[in-house]
Structures are given as structure tokens and as C-alpha cells.
Amino acid sequence: QVQLVESGGGLVQAGGSLRLSCEASGKIFRINDMGWYRQAPGKQRELVAAISRSNVSNYADSVKGRFTISRDNAKKTVYLQMNSLKPEDTAVYYCNAVVLAATLNTLNAWGQGTLVTVSS
């Protein structure tokens, strides 16, 4: 009913940058909060950054000042600009969106994940 497709992951050296994108599609009436989570091997999934429909954002302390979340409501897309990457940022990054579907049901949608690997 609602799909989230991420792109932009890959391998980068420490200090480098990557930009993740996540586009939503399907029978969507409105997308409310959107966010990025990550899960490193052997660890729980954690919130990286989130942004409301009115562009109020919040970040995990570990990425403040390095990562920037943004969204384009017309394109149903959320972005994560990651700068000054560190090896500890290595993880699978998941897109999340709270979607009001065309059926007026609220859905908590997840993408399939994109791997970010930061080499030292």
C-alpha cells in the first residue's frame, strides 16, 4: 500500500560525505513525520534524525553538527546529508515515515534499508 525506497548508501572513507534519499509511493493522502534510523551489527536500531511535516527536526547527539535531514513534500522524499563521517557511523540506515493513507488509516512505514560503510 505504501512503499519507501532508499538510495545513496555505499562505502566512504572517514571524513567523507554521503547523501541518502528515501522516496515514498503508494496510496498516500499525507506524510507526517519522516526520519532515518540506523542499526549497526550487534546493536539495536536507533533514531538518527527526524523531521516533521513543518520541517521541525531533531537529531541524535552523536550526529548533531554533522548530519542534516530535509524533506521535499511535493516529491514525498526525505534526505539525509551525512558529512564528516566516522567509522562508528557504519550501519544499515532505514527510512521511516508516518503516513496517512488514502484510506485514512495511519501507517508506520519502513524502507528496506541501505548500507553505509565508513572505512578508517
Image (tube, rainbow, N blue to C red):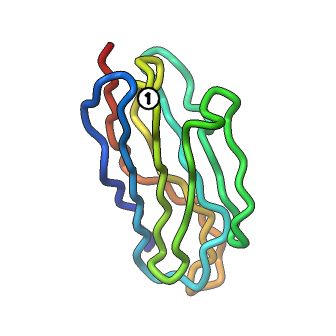
**Number of callouts in the render?**
1
Residue plotted at (63% across, 26% down)? 62
The kind of residue tagged 1 is Leu
Nearer to me, 60 or 39: 60
Q: Residues within 10 Å of mark 1 (few under 14, many from 20)?
A: many
Q: In which quarter of the image is the C terminus?
A: top left
Question: With 24 as the anchor, is 28 left or right in this view?
Answer: right
Residue 37 image point, x, y percent: 54, 41
Nearer to me, 102 or 76: 76
Residue 71 image point, x, y percent: 54, 67
Residue plotted at (63% across, 76% down)? 100
Q: Is residue 13 above or below residue 31?
A: above
Residue plotted at (41% across, 18% down)? 87
Nearer to me, 112 or 66: 66
Residue plotted at (65% across, 36% down)? 64
The part of the image, by quadrant, that contains residue 116 is top left
Residue 75 image point, x, y percent: 44, 78
Give the SS element for disc 1: loop
Q: Quadrant of the N terminus?
A: bottom left
Residue for badge 1: 85
Q: In this view, does 88 lie above or below 66?
A: above
Residue 96 image point, x, y percent: 54, 54
Q: Is residue 62 above or below residue 26?
A: above
Question: With 114 as the anchor, is 59 left or right in this view?
Answer: right
